[in-house]
Image (tube, rainbow, N blue to C red):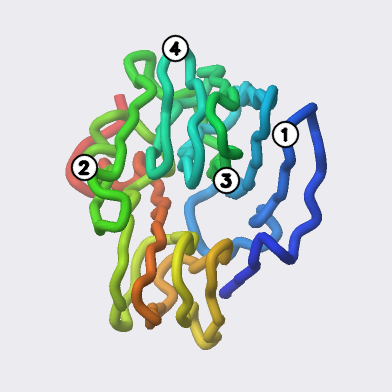
Amino acid sequence: MGYCINIDEVSGEEILPGVIKKVLLEPKHIGRGPPGDLTVTHYTLTEGGVITFEDPKVENQDYIINGTALFGRKHVHANTTIFVPSFKKHSYKHAGESKVQLLSHTYTVPHPNHRWCKTRMAQLTFPLDSEQLMTEEFHGLVGAHRFHALDVQTYDVPEHTNPEETAYFMRGTGKMRSGDKWYDVRPGSLVYVEEEATHEIRCNHPTQYFVMEYVEQDKMWRERGYQES
């Protein structure tokens, strides 16, 4: 099961003053993957805009695509990703000259993250580079339920299979295959790939996109020889 949509194809809704919401991926679009509901939403914040996330049933992985926002008492900038466990309220406030563009991934979780699970942040070292911002090991050790790895990439990827994933294209054009379907991609395109589906990416350089993978972390740890208490 593949799915692709571009942000230009989605009608925006002003949910608060200075906050435009566009839902790019809903649970009805997903195929094989961990139990739970995956949603990917694009938010645009302009002067005075503030968005607060407080659903206790989900964990968040957010990515700042453009602009500067105030996150608590810290300014966060483009190419920053933030992991927030369940039962952790967090907000972004517009705090710069340009608009803020934010992509928020939420996954419902089977039970709260453990009490020592904390909000974590990582930023791309150089804006046009490729980098694994949050590794598979990081998400596992920090206590995430569904998030597995977040990679920023700028290159072609040959045919392969992975856990469930989404890819969001920020710069350039190209093609991405998910299962037996090829999609033309451009800035603002989101592609969904279900677990174990064959996929590949062919870029018209320069291109930049980021890939977010999702797994069932509890099951993975049990498979490694760990048992639930």
Up/down of 93 relative to 4, above or below: above
- Residue 191 in the image: state x and y as whole percent: 54, 67
Q: Amino acid at mark 3?
A: Gly
Q: Amino acid at mark 4?
A: Arg
Q: Quadrant of residue 228?
A: top left
Element class at badge 1? strand
Q: Quadrant of residue 76?
A: top left
Mark 3 and mark 1 residues within 8 Å of each other at the beta carbon: no
Measuring 55% from the left and 81% from the top, which residue is drawn there?
Answer: 184
Q: Residue tagged by mark 1?
A: 19
Give the mark, 4 or 3, whose residue is nearer the N terminus: 3
Query: Considering the image in quadrants, where does the C terminus appear?
Result: top left
Q: Which mark is residue 137?
A: 2
Mark 4 and mark 3 residues within 8 Å of each other at the beta carbon: no
Mark 2 and mark 1 residues within 8 Å of each other at the beta carbon: no
Cα–Cα gap, marks 3 and 1: 27 Å
Of tags 2 and 4, which is closer to the observer? 4
* Residue placed most toward the observer, 95 or 87: 95
Element class at badge 3? loop
Cα–Cα gap, marks 3 and 2: 21 Å
Up/down of 77 relative to 183, above or below: above
Q: Residue tagged by mark 4?
A: 73
Of tags 3 and 1, which is closer to the observer? 1
* Residue placed most toward the observer, 90 or 96: 96
Q: Residue tagged by mark 3?
A: 36
Measuring 37% from the left and 34% from the top, which residue is drawn there?
Answer: 144
Give the mark, 2 or 1, whose residue is nearer the N terminus: 1
- Residue 52 in the image: state x and y as whole percent: 64, 23
Of tags 3 and 2, which is closer to the observer? 2
